[in-house]
Image (cartoon, rainbow, N blue to C red):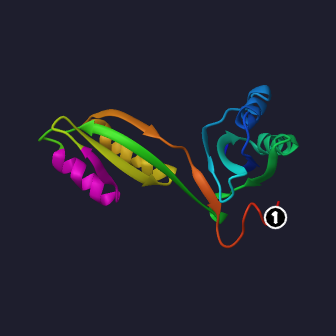
């Protein structure tokens, strides 16, 4: 199973996200991560979908997405020709025995503490999926209280754009 990141440029209208995710449900494909947000134009939103599958599944998903009415563009974002990032907030136990280990990890991973209490530290980490996974593994023995991740956002490298042909 290979990981695929797909950018979908859609009309910014009610129900579009439901139609996109419904297509995955009908075809029995799983969405590993999903992010949606505004674009440079208020008329459009950008959906970034991360999925695992084989070549056939990827091709079928792209073709089915292109058939949806409110979908304007679909673009596969290969790892070698795109830039991707993910955000994670992770809350860990704040105790004297582990504070130095936590601070060392925060510095090495170029993350930052965004909330402090005597009982817990909330840390913001951004980077690729592998970086966030590595940070989690280091924090596990130190006492993770809770965490949440945004999912991947990605853009094509260079001057290329999903909107090479203006809408």
Vertical side of 138 occupied by 110: above or below? below
Q: Residue at x 63, y 60 (%)?
A: 155
Vertical side of 77 occupied by 132: above or below? above
**Image-based side of 69 in relation to 52, left or right:** right
Relative depth, front residue between 165 and 99: 165
Relative depth, front residue between 112 and 17: 17
Q: Which residues are magenta?
A: 99-115
**Image-based side of 101 in relation to 159, left or right:** left
Residue 7 visible: no
Residue 99 screen position, x and y as percent: 17, 46
Q: Residue furthest bottom?
A: 159
- Mark 1: few/some/many CA within 10 Å (<14, 14-19, 20+): few
Residue 109 screen position, x and y as percent: 35, 57
Residue 148 visible: yes
Q: Residue at x 61, y 37 (%)?
A: 32
Image quadrant holding the N terminus, namely top right
Vertical side of 111 occupied by 123: above or below? above
Residue 22 screen position, x and y as percent: 75, 29
Residue 72 screen position, x and y as percent: 81, 51
Mark 1 highlights which residue?
Answer: 166
Q: Residue at x 36, y 41 (%)?
A: 90
């Amino acid at each position: 199973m290979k990981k695929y990141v797909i950018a979908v440029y859609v009309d910014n209208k009610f129900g579009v996200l439901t139609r996109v995710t419904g297509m995955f449900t009908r075809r029995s494909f799983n969405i590993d991560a999903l992010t949606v947000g505004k674009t440079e134009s208020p008329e459009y939103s950008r959906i970034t979908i991360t999925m695992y599958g084989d070549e056939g599944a990827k091709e079928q998903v792209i073709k089915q997405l292109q058939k949806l009415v409110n979908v304007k563009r679909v673009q596969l974002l290969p790892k070698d020709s795109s830039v991707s990032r993910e955000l994670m907030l992770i809350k860990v136990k704040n105790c004297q025995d582990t504070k130095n280990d936590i601070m060392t990890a925060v510095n090495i991973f170029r993350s930052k503490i965004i909330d402090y209490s005597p009982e817990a530290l909330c840390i913001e980490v951004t980077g690729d999926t592998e970086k966030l996974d590595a940070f989690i593994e280091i924090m596990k023995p130190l006492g993770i209280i809770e965490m949440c991740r945004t999912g991947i956002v990605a853009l094509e490298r260079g001057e290329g754009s999903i909107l090479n042909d203006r809408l």
